[in-house]
Image (cartoon, coloured by chain):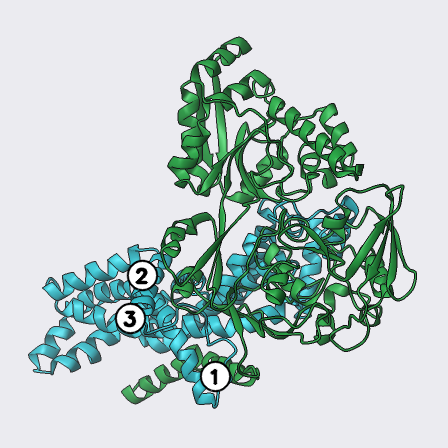
Amino acid sequence: MISKAGQYLLVIFALLLLNFILPRMMPGDPTDFLTGTAVDAPIDLDAESRSRLLEYHGLDKPLTEQFLGYLGKLARFDLGFAIYYRREVSDLLLERLPWTLLLAGTSFLLAAIAGVLLGALAAYRQGSRLDKTLVSSLMGVRAMPAYLVGMLAILLFSIKLKLFPTGGACSPFASHASVLDAGLDILWHLALPALVLTAEQIAGTFLIMRSSMVATLGETYMLMAEAKGLSWGRRVFRYGVRNAILPLYTQLGVHLGFLVTVTIFTESVFNYPGMGRLAYEAAMVHDYPVLQGVFLITSLSIVGLNILVDCTYRLVDPRTGHADE
Amino acid sequence: MTWSRRLASIAILAVLLAGIPFAVVVWREYRAGADLSPGGRVLRFAGEDWGAPSPFRFYPRGPGYIHMSLVFDTLTWKDARGVVGLLAQSWHRSADEKQYTFTLRPGIRWHDGSRLTARDVAFSIDYLKKHHFTWTDLSPIRSARALDDLQVVVDLHTAHAPFLTDIAGSFPVLPAHIWEKVDDPRQFMGQDSLTGSGPFRLESYSSTHGTYSYAANPHYFLGRPRIDRIQYIAAGDSLLALRKGEIDAIPLWSRTLDAVAEFRSDPRYRIVEGPGDWVLRLVFNHRHPALARREIRSAFAHVLDLDDIAERLRHGFVEPGSPAFLPPASTWRHPHLQAYTHDVARARELVEASGVGDLHLVLLTTPDYVREAEVIAEQAREIGIEISVHSVPASTRDAMLRDGRFDLAIDGHGGIGGDPDVLRRQFCPSPDSEAAHSVLNPASAYGYTNADLCRLGDAQLHEVDAQRRREIVLEMQAILARDLPTIALWYPRVFFVYNPDVLDGWFYAPGGIAGGIPLAENKLVYIRGGPLK
């Protein structure tokens, strides 16, 4: 257990180091984006002003000193001051994080439920027309870039059918009569991006579930259940899905990494104000503190999820506990 | 684990994953619900976060400045014809051209009701200089002092031709009674930081959603704005939002130009065409032994069919490049410079005369301009120059340009439609290399120097007589056309599509706003529906 904790601490340190180094490896520096150097704007900045700016943001110091300063601030839960956005990074992230959690969390749940059910169904009807249709259509959606699926969804559901707004997370400048009103408005704006993000994720869950279920259906206990005359639902859900779902659980950490990537595109297409879009925009303007903050939260979430999976796997699959003992 | 426990676990997971964030955002939005008085004329744009419209907090891009200009005023401004007084009613330049005396309009008030005086102007100059305001280069100013409530004197180090457009028309005048207590303006937030004298007051801003709502200032010194409220709302795709009627106007350029034809045929919209103060160009590395030779650069100028590139690749929505460098709409552009005719035989002769043997070059580009790069490579092959196209992200290209790690590159930038001093800043290195290269691109013409050009560049900067200055600028363009430190490939055409039922009278100010922002969202349109009379 101690060695495992040590491993995780090492991973977290490596992540902090990468979070710090990666933004700085991009060509150019943040002041390029505050001045005329990389900006399509008529801005002049003399050498003195530029060096004052670097000094103000602590970018004039050697890298090791900057890194130690970063660690020191982190220890005080201070994520720093955004260079381009000109605000406390923690304020920016606190504003954006709930929107990403809402979008990613909702779509993750929907994709998990739909992927598991459809995967189980396709495996049960392996080789049938339904199976082939599900595999090809879900793989087709997965193969399409998220921004393309998003644009098509906007054209169809928003422009053609006028069912949902073209973008944003809530009606601008609305004064809601009640909390329920506000909730419905947010759900209305959430529907389309969540649908797109769900569609992008289903295929991964579906394929793992399908192959795992195919293997499970071949087990002798499934044959026994059928021989005992148990109902279809009881056989599939009580004995099949329950065992076949285990590989999905171990894949959660990997899946979260994929989810982060797709969320960036989806948020950009729908102008959804989450952390994914913030990360993309911050990378465009080399805002190191913001990138560090976003990477920190994302990477800690993935590490945290892996720790959670590690710690709870015994509960989900008691057989592994017996093996250890 | 029983089924009921399993369902309970799933329900808890659902609450953790989506329920809690949902509750947080719903509660936040419910509490933040804008209490905006209804009615009035509202103008809506597609929103994006450009920072709070305060001098030290707007994001340093044209749209960020435009937001700030709704709340804060400058001494001068631009209407459809050129420079006009804004806070300043008139100004007087001294005989030695190093001193300006501005007389303010009487009766101007800040949003909090206090009077705006000449002391505020002098304070703003000192304060912005002290705190290194990045948008405006105030270094040509030596000092500023108020003579009385309405008169302020600004002393310059030397005569500075673009003073009225690039400095007086660019720096925001701040209320001294608020900002004199602020030690770190970059951390100054709150309502006080948004107290200006401008035609609008910010009533709602969300950085998260990129939304802004501005209410008209009924006591504005030029009169009450014709629009009661300007709102920037979140829209996924601004073109779709305009078609859907969610917004009333959008600028069209770059990839959205194909939509112009569609809006032209729709009677619900009107279009104004802008100057497109932007250029896409072929950059030479003058430290490359072959590219340092003028014959080779001239051969490129003759072999590249700029009309073909403009028509074939950009469907006519761009103007072909000119050796004058400045864009077609610039009043400073040389009217009689001969373009290099498309003449492959002449280009071949020039390459042969240069004595340069087989030439293999790498052309650096970004994914947006790969087609231009491919056409350039194809046309250069006709004169025996082999070009490999190398596409990289824009920031990588910029770093390679800055370090001189390239042979040829395609680069695009704005800022060329304003003051012609851009020619000096683009092509003349100075001991202060940061300042010399601070305009838009650090490697405008890597390794290129021409002492005559730079002497003329310094002369025009300090020449206040418009006619004499024009002659110098024309001479500079003639040198550039002869030397060909770079080849302008095309200048884009920009358009502004709007719904005239909401507001009409849009225009592009010549040379752009505040030193060269080529946008039609000029605050004078909101006040009088057109240029100042």
Q: Which amino acid does label 3 sit on?
A: Leu
Q: Which mark is residue A161?
A: 3
Secondary structure beneath dot 1 equals helix
> Within 10 Å of the Cα at label 1, are there few (<14), some (14-19), or many (20+) other Cα atoms?
some
The one nearer the camera, B106 or B22, is B106
Color used for chain A?
cyan
Given residues A303 and A54, the one toward you in this image is A54
Q: Distance between the residues labelled 2 and 1?
A: 30 Å
The answer to whether residue A16 is seen in the rendering is no
Q: Name the residue under label 2.
A: A152
Q: Which amino acid does label 2 sit on?
A: Leu
Q: Residue B23 carries which label?
A: 1
Among the 4 quarters of the image, the one containing residue B475: top right
Residue at mark 1 to residue at mark 3: CA–CA distance:
29 Å
x then y, percent, for residue B13: 40, 80
| Nearer to the camera, B451 or B183 | B451
Callout 1 touching callout 3 (CB < 8 Å): no
Point 32% across, 63% down: residue: A155
> Relative to B206, is B319 on the left or the right?
left
What is the display colour for chain B? green
**Chain for numbered disc 1:** B
Q: Where is residue B110 in the image (x, y as percent from the top left)?
A: 76, 72
User: Horizontal placement of B527 versus B193: left or right?
Assistant: left
Residue B91 in the image: x percent, y percent? 82, 54
